[in-house]
Image (cartoon, grey):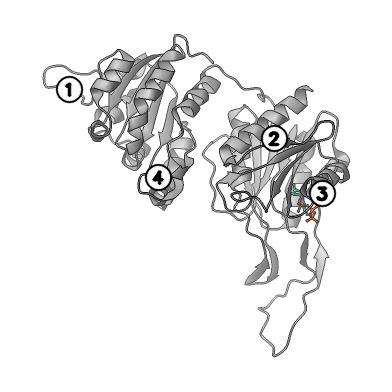
Amino acid sequence: MSLAGRKIVLAVTGSIAAYKTPQLVRLLVKAGAEVKVITTRAATGFVTPLALSTVSKHPVFSDVSDGENWNNHVELGLWADAMVVAPCSANTLAKLANGLCDNLVCAVYLSARCPVFIAPAMDDDMWKHAATRRNVQSLAATGNFIIPVAHGELASGLVGDGRMAEPEQIVEYLDDFLNEKKPLAGLKALVTAGPTYERIDPVRFIGNFSTGKMGFAIAEMLARKGADVTLIAGPTHEKVTNSQITVVNIESAAELYRECTIRFAHTDIAVLAAAVADYRPQEQAREKIKKTNGAIALQLVETEDTLLALGKIKQPAQTLVGFALETTNEEENAHKKLVAKNADMIVLNSLRDTGAGFGHNTNKVTLITKNSEPLHHPLQSKTEVAELIVNAIIDLRHA
Ligand code: CTP
């Protein structure tokens, strides 16, 4: 890892995660970067300018002027090869998304011509609020890079999303970007995510508890490593933060099948993480089914198996990855799926593992490939799991 000669403006804002920024500065400096730190006023309640100036070996500014001297925001913006806003509070996120300019951090942001990396940090509910979602989307859509938040204990005592990425992860993200570590550049990836809904009548469906988090994290990671990603997403609340990902929304297994099969010939890597319904009602009632006094039966028919279909037409240069969610004989079943569906890798998660599977922000996976022993991984955040899956795909393609 090297950031030798890189000029980085680090903007620290008012979030408890600011206490980690002296460590972030140290890591950046250790990687060879020159770091100038600016802060909002609120940030100085969480970390002292003295600590930050000591580790960065540069004065730290919090105001556009100190009354006598003008802290030239335009110059700082132009000086930087990269601007990092870490931690980025909900307030600063909103200001940046809307182009407000009432402090030095906003002024430098508006003056910066370099790439801007934003590491949000806030409480779970604030992170999930519609206003924050909108601000993140808008910042991503206008070319900023959002460093994914982590899951875990928050300052409120709650456990959830919204923790700032660890300093090591932020440095790694910058290293990947600035050194153009894009091993998948020029490749097209197709990812499926989320559940499918199979309609019974106009108001009911057969579905499952998949949230789409794992597939979305994989799409983000493939894009970060340079792939041109299309994400076929079932009904989910997840949103992409990388504006380079094309999202195609679908509802049913049949739609997922159609969208994947028409694209597969032009795809280099396909990762099928969606939890697709295996059965759908044979008939879809046009009117709402009324309650009768006795039991009713629903006739189900099999849906199209997309992974199986893609496995049949797969060419040697294409990499096909499937998922298996099992409850018993996990490895044996996953291995059978690998062979039966002609996949290059199966990502196995067991519902017996706590913290793994649907709805969690963490996952515990075993990677099953044809010629090697199963690779067991510990419980990790879905972003970390996405990275190990994508790295395994890169290894498979080089094998
Ligand atoms: N899959 C698919 N289309 C389906 C069913 C599954 O593309 N109709 C894909 C999933 O996206 C996943 C893999 O196949 O990548 C395995 O899904 P899973 O439901 O575990 O396997 P099934 O083959 O349906 O077997 P079973 O449900 O009997 O375990």
Task: Name the front one of labels 4 and 2.
Answer: 4
Disc number placed over residue 189 in the picture, else none: 2
The answer for how far apart the CA atoms under marks 4 and 2 are is 34 Å
Q: Residue at x 45, y 24 (%)?
A: 115
Residue 359 in picture, x, y percent from top left: 58, 53
**Labels 4 and 3: the sequence-earlier one:** 4
Could you tell me which secondary element the residue under label 4 belongs to?
loop
Q: Amino acid at mark 1?
A: Ser
Relative to 210, 260 lies left or right: right
Could you tell me which secondary element the residue under label 2 belongs to?
strand
The answer for how far apart the CA atoms under marks 4 and 3 are is 38 Å
| Residue for badge 3 | 333
**Labels 2 and 1: the sequence-earlier one:** 1
Relative to residue 7, is residue 395 depicted above or below?
Answer: below
Q: Amino acid at mark 4?
A: Leu
| Residue for badge 4 | 154
Other residues around mark 4 within 10 Å, as few (<14) / some (14–19) / many (≥20): some
Q: Amino acid at mark 3?
A: Asn
Task: Name the front one of labels 3 and 1.
Answer: 3
Q: Amino acid at mark 2?
A: Ala
Q: Quadrant of residue 299?
A: bottom right
